[in-house]
């Protein structure tokens, strides 16, 4: 196992008790972080990289994406920006394109998005199904997704497909579909919202997923203050995602639970909608994560730095809180403790910024600030 010393780190964000270290160094051994501390006391290693005062942060943990799909919906986006309102109806055009795509086309489209995210610092990501909506196509999408990540989510209950009867479709999801998909997924998710699935349907699907060994997470309260957040807490879900429209009772329920509130500001940005109030959640003691929601309908971005900038500008988060939510928060939303922190024993996932401070992620929006990415100990990007 070879070791790598990264030294000359102007600012090292650890997300650990150590907080932010100045004039720091990190030693990586194989796929893991072996040592962190002051550069002046760093042990020797097989190879050494001096990052010349750059900031180093944990790799981003994007805990909510829909990366398995074919086609795009740029015309729908343009129409929406021209003044039409967002509905979930457009999903069916992605479903048709996805069903028509070959395995190799889906695989290469996914690889392109994964690589795009990696270049922007994402080292762990979750990926949902939900554009197949048949037994065969949902299982196929998850088989391809698990080639890229262990964090796969069965989202057969994304929308009722065009032409299907609601009750029949819920029965299909809870019967043959979950049976075909459970072996390829870690999580079960439901789009519990206006125009999607109601409280009873959501509980029925979650129960079926749990019975097949899947762990719950939920799309909740994106379009209105519905029952989603309360159901997520009731099921001990790892995460309630969106949380844009919350009652005081919803905030209290999240604060008293282990359920993370995952905020997806790219969805509000791309649909020109009201942003969630992160400040209210943080002040109540809720654990907050930031994720991209990358999907072709409402948030076609893989950029965690964009989400950080939006969270700071539009949602009342400080730059430090937004970075924490995009790294450790995402890890907690996936119930992981091996990623999201720069600490001995964690997976060696780091981002070297072309900036002296993590603050620049929000301070310099839209600028490509990711200079290099270390993923499981492998250095990618700019060679020094
Ligand atoms: Zn989503």
Image: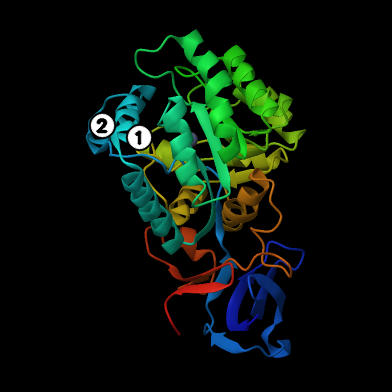
316 or 173, which is in the foreground?
173
Label 2, residues with CA under 10 Å away: few <14, some 14-19, many ≥20: some
Residue at horizontal 57%, vertical 56%? 323
Disc 2 element: helix
Label annotation for residue 297? 1
Residue at horizontal 54%, vertical 33%? 181
- The type of colouring in the image is rainbow
Disc 1 element: loop
Residue 154 falls in which quadrant of the image?
top right
Residue at horizontal 70%, vertical 36%? 259
31 or 246, which is in the foreground?
31
Res. 326 visible in picture: yes
Residue 14 falls in which quadrant of the image?
bottom right
Where in the figure is residue 335, as x and y percent of width and height? 69, 46
Label annotation for residue 57? none
Res. 243 visible in picture: no
How many numbered marks are there?
2
Relative to 121, say whether 212 is above or below: above
The reply to whether discs 2 and 1 touch (Cβ–Cβ < 8 Å) is yes
In this figure, which residue is indicated by the disc labeled 2?
76
Residue at horizontal 54%, vertical 86%? 50
Where in the figure is residue 12, as x and y percent of width and height? 63, 72
Where in the figure is residue 344, as x and y percent of width and height? 73, 70
Ligand 1 neighbours mark 2 (CB distance < 8 Å):
no
Assign the N terminus to one quadrant of the image: bottom right
Who comes first in sequence, dot 2 or dot 1?
Answer: 2
Assign the C terminus to one quadrant of the image: bottom left
């Amino acid at each position: 196992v070879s070791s790598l010393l990264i030294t000359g780190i102007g600012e090292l964000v650890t997300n650990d008790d150590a907080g932010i270290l100045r004039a720091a160094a990190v030693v990586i051994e194989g796929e893991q972080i072996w040592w962190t501390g002051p550069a002046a006391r760093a042990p020797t290693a097989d190879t050494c990289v001096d990052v010349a005062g750059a900031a180093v942060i944990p790799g981003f943990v994007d805990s909510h994406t829909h990366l398995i799909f074919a086609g795009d919906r740029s015309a729908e986006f343009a129409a929406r920006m021209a003044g039409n309102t967002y509905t979930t109806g457009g999903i069916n055009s992605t479903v048709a394109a996805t069903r028509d795509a070959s395995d190799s086309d889906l695989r290469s489209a996914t690889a392109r998005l994964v690589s795009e995210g990696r270049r922007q610092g994402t080292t762990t990501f979750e990926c949902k199904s939900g554009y197949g909506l048949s037994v065969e196509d949902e299982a196929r999408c998850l088989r391809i997704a698990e080639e890229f990540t262990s964090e796969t989510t069965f989202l057969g209950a994304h929308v009722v497909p065009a032409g299907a009867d609601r009750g029949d479709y819920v029965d299909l999801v809870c019967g043959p579909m979950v049976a075909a998909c459970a072996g390829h997924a870690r999580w079960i998710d439901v789009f519990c919202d206006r125009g999607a699935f109601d409280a009873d349907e959501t509980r029925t699907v979650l129960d079926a997923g749990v019975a097949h060994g899947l762990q719950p997470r939920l799309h909740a309260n994106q379009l209105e203050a519905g029952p989603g957040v309360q159901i997520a807490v009731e099921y001990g879900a790892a995460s309630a995602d969106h949380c844009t429209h919350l009652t005081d009772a919803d905030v209290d329920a999240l604060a008293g639970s282990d359920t993370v509130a995952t905020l997806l500001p790219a969805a509000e940005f791309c649909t020109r909608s009201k942003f969630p109030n992160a400040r209210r959640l943080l002040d109540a003691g809720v654990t907050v994560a930031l994720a991209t929601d990358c999907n072709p309908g409402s948030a076609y971005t893989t950029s965690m730095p964009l989400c950080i900038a939006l969270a700071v500008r539009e949602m009342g988060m400080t730059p430090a809180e937004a970075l924490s939510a995009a790294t450790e928060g995402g890890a907690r939303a996936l119930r992981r403790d091996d990623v999201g922190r720069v600490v001995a024993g964690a997976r060696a996932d780091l981002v070297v910024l072309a900036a002296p401070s993590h603050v620049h992620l929000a301070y310099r929006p839209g600028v490509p600030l990711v200079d290099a990415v270390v993923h499981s100990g492998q250095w990618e990007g700019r060679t020094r």
